Image (cartoon, helix red, strand yellow):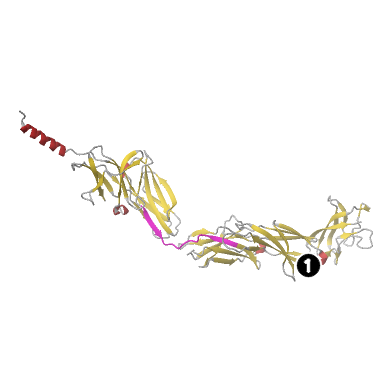
């Protein structure tokens, strides 16, 4: 016969032991904060097979529990992180915005038995300080990710502007503050810190995300140099500015080279979508290059024109009845240059176009007998290619005016002669003065001198070494000293006809 007394005692003893058998706690692997400043707590599940759920505890600081009874989390979603099965819980808790929060868990089984507390992980709390919106240095400071202390590969410092990556800097473990230098722009700056696990770099923990809204005035999306030209002998430029810009201060820069450096000429205050400026420099002294830089509310230079506005510098040299023109190319139209127009006038006439070229030089040959004045004026007009993307009009750039002074006292009545003919049978200059140090030479096409004289009244009769010279084109040169004691050299060609 079985003694029921011992059976009852065994049953009671089993129930007592079973009721007090605690499940094992889970293992917290990391905590993370997303872009909306929500906490993510990750843990490996308990090794105990009968866990019904987990109870999450959050502490502002260790020992202060804002959730006295914890939050119950079902034995829920499994997410693979670095090949480990871990449980994740989205946990919105405002404290992560202003301090580090510590998380720990307990396992609860179907008999409502609870485990001991798990290990603890505390969030990274980041602060960002700047004295005012104009300060370019942002001071970042954060606490250690203590759960990985001694096993952190690096901290990533991440800065974004309007959700676009701005800076990403790595610092070693042990560094918990950093001065980040940035150029302040309008928009929303976001900063956060990311701890990277040394054993497994795929495991990371982000801090809270700190947003700083910059109320600085909106910058222009573009500044375009429409043209540089010469007006009344002085460089003049025009820039187009994004009409949505809220900035009102712009600095004109000038350089003798397109690569700079650019010196500040002046600052212009305007709310218009264009700026026109005339420099007091002498456009006939060389080429000048200009840019335009926007200045923000803090006095910092922030946006510079996408291209440069330059002037065209023209030089002209007379050689007899020919004028050699050379000029610097226009710099710069992104769409390119369509053509250059060569324009010419006399003192008492208007400019007219005498040629259209694509190069940066031109030789003008004219009939000396058709010129009644002793000065010729030249200028170059550059024409922009269509399609610059900023305006439907094609811009032009006009060079300085180059003046050529013709030798009014040394002239030739004709540029061809026939030796032995009834007229035009010799060749030489007509002068109404007797120059000093005079030399008149004629050269054949091989550069051999066929005639030379120091007598202003002697002319070439078309002979070479007492024999008739061959027909063809000959080059002549005259050297002399004028009445102002200036040494002069003029050149030209003549055709010998038989």
**Image spot of residue 70 (x, y percent):** 23, 48
Quarter of the image holding residue 133?
bottom left
What span is colored magenta in the figure?
209-226
**Left-right relation of 261 to 162:** right
Give the vertical position of 207 relative to 51 (above or below). below
Residue in view at x 23 percent, y 42 percent: 52
How many numbered circles does the render carry?
1
Residue in view at x 41 percent, y 56 percent: 189
Give the vertical position of 442 relative to 82 (above or below). below
**Left-right relation of 228 to 152:** right
Q: Which residue lies furthest to the front in this view?
A: 1
Please say whether residue 136 is one of the residues in the magenta stretch: no
The N terminus, quarter of image: top left
**Image spot of residue 235 (x, y percent):** 62, 64
Q: Assign a secondary structure to mark 1.
A: loop
Quarter of the image holding residue 397?
bottom right
**Left-right relation of 124 to 249:** left
Q: Residue furthest top?
A: 1
**Image spot of residue 384 (x, y percent):** 63, 60
**Left-right relation of 34 to 461:** left
| Depth check, front residue: 105 or 235 | 105
The C terminus, quarter of image: bottom right
Taking the image as drawn, is residue 129 in sight? no
Please say whether residue 215 is one of the residues in the magenta stretch: yes
| Depth check, front residue: 431 or 417 | 417
Taking the image as drawn, is residue 224 in sight? yes
Residue under label 1, please give it. 374
| Depth check, front residue: 48 or 213 | 48
**Image spot of residue 209 (x, y percent):** 36, 52
Q: Callout 1: 10 Å neighbours few (<14), some, many (20+)?
A: some
């Amino acid at each position: 016969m079985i003694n029921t007394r011992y059976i009852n005692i065994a049953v009671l003893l089993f129930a007592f032991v079973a009721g007090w058998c605690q499940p094992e706690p889970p293992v917290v692997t990391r905590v993370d904060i997303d872009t909306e400043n929500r906490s993510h707590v990750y843990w490996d599940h308990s090794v105990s097979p009968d866990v019904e759920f987990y109870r999450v505890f959050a502490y502002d600081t260790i020992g202060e529990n804002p959730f006295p009874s914890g939050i119950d989390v079902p034995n829920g979603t499994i997410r693979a992180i670095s090949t480990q099965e871990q449980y994740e819980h989205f946990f919105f808790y405002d404290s992560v915005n202003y301090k580090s929060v510590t998380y720990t868990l307990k396992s609860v089984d179907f008999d409502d038995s609870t485990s001991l507390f798990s290990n603890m992980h505390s969030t990274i709390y980041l602060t960002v300080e700047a004295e005012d919106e104009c300060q370019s240095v942002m001071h970042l400071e954060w606490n250690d990710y203590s759960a990985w202390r001694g096993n952190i590969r690096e901290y990533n410092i991440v800065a974004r502007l309007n959700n676009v990556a701005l800076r990403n800097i790595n610092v070693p473990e042990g560094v918990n503050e950093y001065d980040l230098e940035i150029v302040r722009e309008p928009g929303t700056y976001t900063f956060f810190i990311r701890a990277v696990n040394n054993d497994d770099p795929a495991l990371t923990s982000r801090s809270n995300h700190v947003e700083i809204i910059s109320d600085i005035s909106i910058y222009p999306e573009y500044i375009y140099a429409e043209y540089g030209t010469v007006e009344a002998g002085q460089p003049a430029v025009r820039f187009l500015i994004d009409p949505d810009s809220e900035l009102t201060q712009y600095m004109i820069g000038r350089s003798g080279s397109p690569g700079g450096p650019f010196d500040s000429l002046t600052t212009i205050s305007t709310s218009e979508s264009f700026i026109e400026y005339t420099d007091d420099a002498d456009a006939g002294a060389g080429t000048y290059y200009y840019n335009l830089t926007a200045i923000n509310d803090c006095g910092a230079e922030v946006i510079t024109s996408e291209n440069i506005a330059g002037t065209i510098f023209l030089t002209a040299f007379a050689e007899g009845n020919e004028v050699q023109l050379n000029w610097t190319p226009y710099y710069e139209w992104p769409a390119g240059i369509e053509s250059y127009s060569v324009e010419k006038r006399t003192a008492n006439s208007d400019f007219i176009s005498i040629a259209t070229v694509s190069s940066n030089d031109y030789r003008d040959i004219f009939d000396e007998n058709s010129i009644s004045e002793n000065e010729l004026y030249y200028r170059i007009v550059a024409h922009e290619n269509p399609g610059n993307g900023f305006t439907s009009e094609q811009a032009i750039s006009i060079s300085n005016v180059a003046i050529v002074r013709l030798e009014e006292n040394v002239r030739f009545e004709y540029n061809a002669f026939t030796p032995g003919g009834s007229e035009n049978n010799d060749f030489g200059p007509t002068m109404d003065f007797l120059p000093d140090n005079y030399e008149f030479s004629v050269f054949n096409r091989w550069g051999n001198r066929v005639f030379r004289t120091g007598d202003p009244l002697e002319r070439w009769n078309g002979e070479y070494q007492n024999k008739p010279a061959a027909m063809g084109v000959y080059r002549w040169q005259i050297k002399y000293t004028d009445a102002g004691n200036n040494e002069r050299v003029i050149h030209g060609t003549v055709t010998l006809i038989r």
